Image: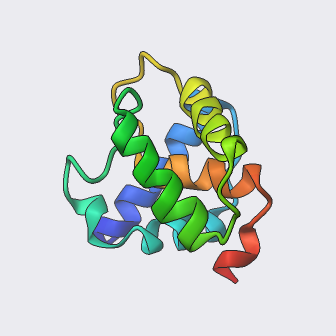
Amino acid sequence: MSKRDDLIAKYAADLRDKLGIEPDMDLLTKVTIGCGPSIYNADGETVAGSDKSELERVKDSYLVKKLGLPDGPELMAAIEDVITRYGTSNRNKYRPVVYYLLCTHFGKQSAYA
């Protein structure tokens, strides 16, 4: 297995173990690839759930630019919901997992078609 395959397996385990979700592996793989090289960097691989500027970046760069959603208060509410579901005390909120959850929340799987 490649390093990326190992990371995808780790993200899938997080979805199963911490969130009780059986992931769509094809979508999870595409979301992970979409994150680019940031997944290989310990700081870039995770989302700081308590850092408001980080959450704004997720909203602007991912939800608005990548998924094409119109900016509005429901975007930040969805991010906060995902962070809460993932576990506020959970130190490692992996970026691909957060993006996967947001993608499915908004039903924007077509962005990865």
The correct choice, above or below, for 84 with respect to 23 in the image is above
Residue 28 rendering spot, x and y as whole percentages: 58, 62
The N terminus sits in image quarter? bottom left
Instruction: Tell which residue pokes out farthest to the bottom in this image.
Output: 113
Instruction: Tell which residue pokes out farthest to the front in this image.
Output: 72
Residue 4 rendering spot, x and y as whole percentages: 34, 68
Residue 6 rendering spot, x and y as whole percentages: 36, 59
Instruction: Tell which residue pokes out farthest to the top in this image.
Output: 89
Left or right, residue 100 beside residue 22: left
- Say how the picture is coloured: rainbow
Identify the residue at horizontal 23%, vertical 61% (top origin): 40
Please state the total of marks drawn on the protein image: 0
Identify the residue at horizontal 75%, vertical 49% (top origin): 105
Identify the residue at horizontal 70%, vertical 63% (top origin): 70
> Residue 82's image quarter?
top right
The correct choice, above or below, for 26 with respect to 58 in the image is below
In front: 60, or 90?
60
Task: Determine if residue 10 is in view.
Answer: no
Task: Determine if residue 74 is in view.
Answer: yes
